[in-house]
Amino acid sequence: VFNMGYGTNSTTVPALVGRGDLVAVLDGADAVMLSGETAAGKYPLESIKAMKSILREADDIIDETTSYARSAKKSANVVPLADVELDAVARAACRAAEALDAKLITCVTRSGQLAKAVARHRPSVPIVAFCYDAAVGRSLALHRAVTPILLDAGAAKCDVLGTSMGLLRAESVRTCRELGYVADGDRVVSVDRALGKAHDAFAVAQTLKIYTVSAEGGEI
């Protein structure tokens, strides 16, 4: 998170320092903030409009190729070795959403790391992250494109510890439909992590699924 600076306290024109701070968007900043401009400045609304305009321009500068190239390079430097599989799936989810014109990316996450991994690659569609902990949800709200939704506290004892991830995935889609994020016919990219069972040859699997929302089940 970057602070815009005190560039518009007494003028409607953003100061150079304010515009300079927002260049951080090009370096992957998830959020920026105003402080004095809205708390004590003479033009709080104009400050917000100026910041919004600059943010949109910065996002436009980062085209598809540059975005993926930068995110891949950045990931190579910041992703722990233990999370390289998760990061690869997160990057693939963003590419799939772009290629298929998906409506959104969904994920079910306990710690928030899954949603953060997807957000790191700056997807062109919203990320709806279902989590169990309010603190995790508040943290995710600061990340680019992420909308956290808190699951029933009782569900925290479910998956990853019991309930099928498939059921949680279905519940996430149902919730997105109810909230108006998707409708029948929309494509959705889903990312999650599932524990391996006794007969599996893995401890944790990173899963990417792509589907078209439908009120009725389908056939293979």
Image: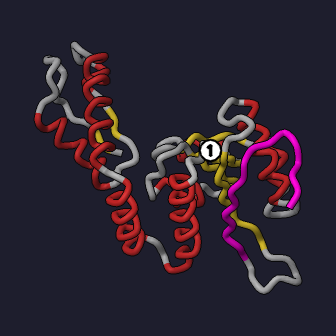
Q: Extreme left residue here?
A: 16
Q: Residue at x 33, y 43 (%)?
A: 59
Q: Quadrant of residue 120?
A: bottom left
Tell me the crowding category of disc 1: few under 14, some 14 to 19, or many 20 or more residues within 10 angstroms, Cα based. Answer: many
Residue situated in front as seen by the camera: 126 or 165: 126
Q: Residue at x 54, y 46 (%)?
A: 140
Figure quadrant of the C terminus: bottom right
Figure quadrant of the N terminus: top left
Q: Quadrant of residue 10?
A: top left
Tell me: 115 left or right of 207.
left
Q: Looking at the picture, does residue 202 appear above or below residue 141? A: below
Q: Residue at x 55, y 47 (%)?
A: 101
The amino acid type, in three-letter code, at marker 1 is Val
Residue 107 on image: x %, y %: 66, 53
Q: Residue at x 18, y 24 (%)?
A: 8
The question of residue 99 being in magenta is answered with: no
Residue situated in front as seen by the camera: 165 or 162: 165
Residue 30 on image: x %, y %: 40, 47
The question of residue 211 being in magenta is answered with: yes
Q: Looking at the picture, does residue 217 appear above or below residue 79? A: above
- SS label for mark 1: strand
Tell me: 4 left or right of 15.
right
Q: Extreme top residue here?
A: 42
Residue 93 on image: x %, y %: 57, 60
Residue matched to label 1? 128
Q: Looking at the image, can residue 63 be seen?
A: yes
Residue 135 on image: x %, y %: 61, 45
Q: Looking at the image, can residue 135 be seen?
A: no
Q: Which residues are magenta?
A: 204-220
